[in-house]
Image (tube, rainbow, N blue to C red):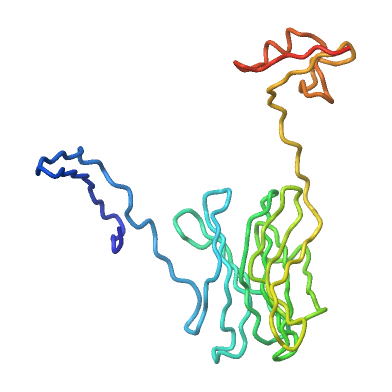
Amino acid sequence: VTEVNQNEIRYFQLVVEDIWGLKSSSNIELGNSYKRFNQTFGGNSSDYGYSVQQTSDGGYITLGYKDIAGNLSNFDWYVIKVDENGDEINSQTFDGDGHNDYGRSVIETYEGNFIMTGNMEPVQNTDYLHVIKVPANPVTPFWEYTYTNYEGGGKSIIQTSDGGYVVAGHAYTTDNTPSGFLIRFASDEFIPDPEYDGPTWHVSTDGSDSNDGSLGSPFATIQQGIDVANPGNTIGEGD
């Protein structure tokens, strides 16, 4: 469904007809596809949104680039944090010394911070892949990184299961021809181990009922295993 105005409610009904012309209609249900909000950000010049992600607080974080000079010759990264209604909470621009810098991808990290990638142009017509990590209030970066071995730019960033990061982009490695490019960063966040949930609960004479029941952290009593086990789980008794 498209072109639904804010606060407009539409109803849906499914009608099925067989080859003999017999029809069956579903009950009319209240739809929930109306537009939640429509917001515009930026100034009177050319400003672009390029990436968006819903955040853990129900709002959204978006990244793009903003025409600072108003003449299409000086773009800065432009990150905006909004609430669940699209109202701006805060925003910030990041620049690479006065040339065309394009923010391309932003994500929220496990610890509730934000990390972004794109390109920075420290010298006119010379672009480099760039990464910036900022706190939830994206004003002062925790750290920044520029890959200067080759010209290029970052297009997408993810956080890995161990808390690190991988950036995909492009690099001009030979003959001014772009190649796909990946760069991985080590973890700088604490990622807790997942809580043990069976299906085998381990018991040992040198265990403790305050343990989690995994093989490396067994319980001391079978009763503790019985208390936490789900249907179909097993309890293994060791030495």
Q: Nearer the viewer, residue 80 or 190?
A: 190
Q: Where residue 33 sits: x, y (%)?
A: 33, 52
Looking at the image, how many numbered discs can be counted on the residues? 0
Q: Where residue 103 sits: x, y (%)?
A: 63, 73
Asked whether, in this view, residue 35 is left or right of residue 24, the answer is: right
* Residue for point 63% across, 59% down: 107
* Residue for point 53% across, 57% down: 60
Asked whether, in this view, residue 109 is left or right of residue 14, the answer is: right
Q: Nearer the viewer, residue 177 or 222?
A: 177
The quadrant of the image that shows the C terminus is top right
Extreme residue in the front direction: 19
Q: Nearer the viewer, residue 6 or 186?
A: 186
Placement of 194 over or under 135, stated as above or below: above
Tell me which corner region of the image, top left, top right, bottom left or bottom right, holds residue 182: bottom right
Tell me which corner region of the image, top left, top right, bottom left or bottom right, holds residue 53: bottom right
Placement of 100 over or under 181, stated as above or below: below
* Residue for point 44% across, 56% down: 85
The quadrant of the image that shows the N terminus is bottom left
Q: Where residue 144 sits: x, y (%)?
A: 77, 69
Q: Where residue 195 sits: x, y (%)?
A: 71, 31
* Residue for point 52% across, 79% down: 47
Tell me which corner region of the image, top left, top right, bottom left or bottom right, holds residue 232: top right
